[in-house]
Image (spheres, rainbow, N blue to C red):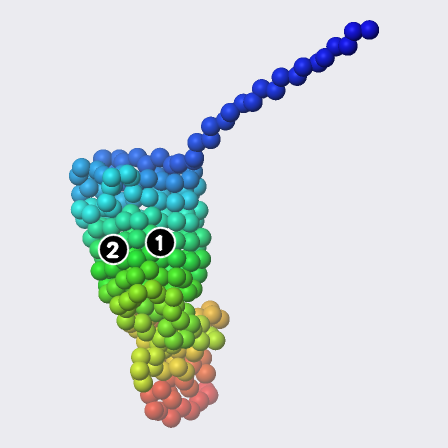
């Protein structure tokens, strides 16, 4: 009996996997750069005339932003006033928004993990919140912005990343810049959050209380801790609050001086106003 040998040939298929990348398109008529897709978005920072750019939109799905090869940020893109970043973003690359001198505000997403070297250098940011998710900020990333920087965590910070900025930490003291390598060249200000949510700022012997972060940014302190507590508690309960002898519906009205001019006081409110003015309060019935 003849033996048959079964020969099996295995064919090996080679797959070439292309890294996911987003596509960025510039609409010259509207002046908007829109990046959509998955993965990394390489911004066209090598454009000949960057003054035509007015707005940058990074759509959901993009996880990182980088400068296009050969580009050196948006130096010269002086008309960009708005940058919209998605919640999917985890990394901002080096020099990406460098030189956007018209950019005053940007909201960093809560999933962001790293900010690259010089990413926002020489922009005109007024204030910026660094989410607790950020673990690393590379050197010179906010240099020359003169921004007020709010840290919700304590990331590792590269050399001169915060040069010329003013820093507020979520913790007491200056723990948010403890991990700063080299010379931070920063003006740290102790900022703790009290039990009721007020911002307590201590600069030397001076202590100020702010009812919200927005009021801290606009430098609108409460008269004292008690007033701050009363304002926050009233807003939390959906009630008007008394400040400076006037009633306000919310904190933004108080900041702008828009008090309630026509209203009927309850007995308790009338007594509060009288005490504030130093008057004697009595109730008369008819």
Residue closest to the eye, 119 or 24: 119
Q: Quadrant of the C terminus?
A: bottom left
Q: In screen coordinates, is 49 left or right of 280? A: left
Q: Visible in this render: residue 35?
A: yes
Query: What crowding class fits label 1: few (fewer than 14 Cα within 10 Å), some (14-19), or many (20 or more)?
Result: many
Residue closest to the eye, 10 or 41: 10
Residue matched to label 1: 115
Residue closest to the eye, 207 or 285: 207
- In this rendering, the answer to whether 246 lies above or below 69 is below
Residue matched to label 2: 121
Q: Position of residue 149 (x, y in %)?
A: 32, 64
Q: Visible in this render: residue 244?
A: no
Q: Quadrant of residue 139?
A: bottom left
- In this rendering, the answer to whether 8 lies above or below 256 is above
Q: Earlier in the sequence, mark 2 or mark 1?
A: 1
The disc at residue 88 is none
Q: Position of residue 264 (x, y in %)?
A: 40, 76
Whole-angstrom CA distance, mark 2 to mark 1, is 11 Å
Secondary structure beneath dot 1 equals: strand
Count of numbered badges drawn on the protein: 2
The single residue placed furthest to the bottom in the displayed view is 280
The single residue placed furthest to the top in the displayed view is 1
Q: Position of residue 123 (x, y in %)?
A: 23, 55
């Amino acid at each position: 009996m003849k033996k048959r040998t079964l020969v099996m040939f295995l064919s090996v298929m080679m797959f070439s996997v292309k890294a996911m990348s987003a596509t960025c398109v510039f609409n010259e008529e509207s002046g908007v750069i829109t990046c959509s897709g998955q993965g990394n978005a390489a911004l066209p920072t090598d454009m000949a005339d960057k003054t035509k750019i007015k707005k940058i939109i990074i759509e959901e799905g993009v996880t990182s932003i980088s400068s296009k090869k050969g580009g050196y940020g948006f130096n010269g893109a002086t008309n960009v006033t708005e940058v919209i970043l998605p919640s999917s973003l985890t990394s901002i690359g080096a020099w990406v928004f460098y030189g956007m001198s018209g950019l005053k505000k940007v909201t960093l997403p809560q999933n962001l993990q790293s900010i690259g070297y010089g990413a926002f250098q020489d922009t005109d940011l007024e204030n910026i919140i660094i989410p607790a998710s950020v673990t690393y900020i590379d050197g010179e990333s906010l240099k020359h912005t003169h921004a007020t920087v709010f840290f919700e965590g304590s990331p590792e910070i590269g050399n001169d990343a915060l040069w010329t900025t003013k820093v507020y930490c979520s913790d007491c003291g200056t723990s948010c810049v403890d991990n700063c390598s080299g010379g931070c060249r920063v003006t740290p200000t102790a900022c703790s959050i009290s039990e009721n949510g007020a911002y307590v700022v201590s600069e030397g012997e001076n202590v100020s209380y702010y009812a919200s972060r927005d009021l801290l940014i606009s430098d609108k302190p409460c008269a004292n801790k008690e007033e701050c507590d009363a304002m926050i508690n009233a807003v939390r309960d959906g009630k008007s609050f008394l400040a400076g002898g006037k009633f306000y519906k919310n904190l933004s009205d108080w900041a702008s001086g828009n008090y309630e001019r026509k209203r009927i006081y309850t007995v308790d409110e009338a007594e509060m106003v009288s005490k504030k003015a130093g008057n004697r309060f009595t109730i008369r019935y008819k």
